[in-house]
Image (tube, rainbow, N blue to C red):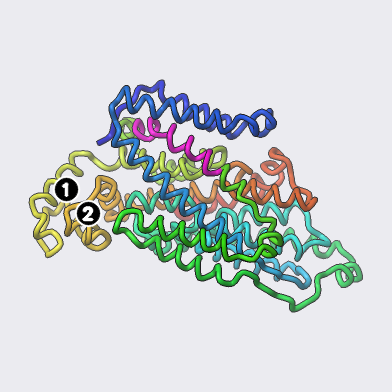
Amino acid sequence: MITEPTPWMLLPFVMLLALMALAPLFFSALWARYYIHITLGLAGVTILYYLVGLHATGRILATGGDYLRFITLIGSLYIVAGGIHCDVKGEATPSRNVLFLLTGAMVSNVLGTTGASMLFIRPWLRMNKYRVTAHHVVFFIFIVSNVGGALTPVGDPPLYLGFLKGVPFWWVLQRCWEVWATAVGILLLLFYAIDRRNYLRAPRRVREELAEPPDTFKISGLPNLLLLGVIFGSTFVENPPFLREFLMVAAAVLSWRLTPRRVHEANEFSLHPVKEVAILFVGIFGTMMPAMDWLQTDAATLGAPTPGLFYFSSGLLSSLLDNAPTYLTFLSALFGSVVPQSSIDQLLAWLHQNSTLAAAGAVPPPELAGAVQFLRTHFAQAVGSGTTTHDMLRVSWILSDPGLSRFIMAISAGSVFFGANTYIGNGPNLMVKAIADQQRVHTPSFLGYVVRFTLPCMAPMLLIIWWLFFRS
């Protein structure tokens, strides 16, 4: 059941997101000292309102469950990936760099953009050490830390939240691979053109003297690859409740205990980044409930939506705020704008009346046939046991219609791709910048990032994606 909070309760959400975007730029010392108090305080105001004002304990528990599942995946991938160290050496030619970034993009769908970024950024900087510059850092953020992870729920947090809401695990890969391949291909071509120009500036004698020795590829911490397999496989576990999260936590604990100290030291591994993410997302998940509930109940009054509108709206917000809550916000808006509540009530009533026959082939009315078939295919266990959720019903209603399914494609691509537009669009972006700064690699400022790279490189790619896939 969706609650209807007062519009005033949107303020804690807006305040928190504004502080996350602006405080590190204008009063970073104060933010670093008090962000925990501010974040938890704003979340506490919203939670107290839901408890006392709306008596919506169930809503809070549901949101808490979403947060637990989200942070368990992010944290376990971060810890296990931090136990793997790659030595990739040899001369970093433009073509070899392109192959490295393409590999990172594909691996992002298995390790997540956070895990892949932490695994590959240091070898990437070492490979290019004699000519590393801003474009190496920024295109790594574009491709490995963001766009690359757009094919699986493990790849990027927004898609995992969509998976938790009912979007089938392999649906994004099946429906969005062309979007992904086009976006990654355009960025790799742009990078190659820029990197080749940079490569030719260095005299051949300098390249030969300073390049890393050839043919020295080494991976340390190989047992963690098995633990990554455990995390990936556990995403398919649905019952009993919280077994999935238990397996993820167990994999992270084993990695922490079994990884040799020298590997963590080589990676300069620290738990601080994941602790900060965990705290900030307590605030985000807590304060965003009124925004999500308002959108879900009132989005139908906003006019006739289009996939392009959802692509740009979710994308632009993801550029300035974290893309995970942005995805959930626009998914809620989509539920409210294109899924008639009367149809969901009719679908739920039919499933209830045919609870013993639904999984065995009872014939639904024509207007429900597509959604019922989708439910039987992707949520057979829930249909058979009578435990389908409203989110499953809404997702099935949308994804069973090819026209409506483009809306979720648009939200997925917008949230993931546009997250690369600024340092604050996605968690790994700032992590990569911090590592590059630590190694004295030049990185652009916040505005320099946007002016020098986002506008001339990302923006054309994003417009091409809209024109090819979401224009009509």
Proximity of marks 2 and 1: CB atoms separated by less than 8 Å: yes
- Comes first in the chain, label 2 or label 1: 1
Q: What residue is shown with label 2?
A: 371
Q: Nearer the viewer, residue 292 or 86?
A: 86
Residue 158: % across, % down: 46, 49
Decide: few, some or many residues near mark 1? Use Cα within 10 Å; few <14, some 14-19, many ≥20.
Answer: many
Identify the residue at the far front of this view: 257
User: SS at mark 2?
Assistant: helix
Q: Residue furthest right?
A: 205
Residue 42 position (above or below residue 73) = above
- Which secondary structure is most common in the magenta stretch? helix
* Residue at x 22% of width, y 54% of height: 371
What x and y, as percent, mark residue 180?
50, 60
The answer to whether 371 appears left or right of 198 in the picture is left
Q: Position of residue 27 (x, y in %)?
A: 68, 28
Which range of residues does the magenta coloring cover? 277-295
Quadrant of the drawing holding the N terminus:
top left
Q: CA distance from mark 2 to mark 1?
A: 8 Å
Residue 391 is at least partly visible in this image: yes
Position above or below: 238 against 39: below
Q: Residue furthest bottom?
A: 215
Q: How many marks?
A: 2
For mark 1, give the secondary structure: helix
Identify the residue at image location x=22%, y=56%.
382
10 Å neighbourhood of mark 2: few (<14), some, or many (≥20)?
Answer: many
Hey, which quadrant is residue 132 in on the image?
Answer: bottom right
Residue 178 image offset from top left, x and y in percent: 47, 62
Magenta highlight on residue 438: no
Frontmost residue, 349 versus 16: 16
**Residue 289 colored in magenta in the image:** yes
Q: Which residue is mark 1?
A: 347
Kind of residue at disc 1: Leu
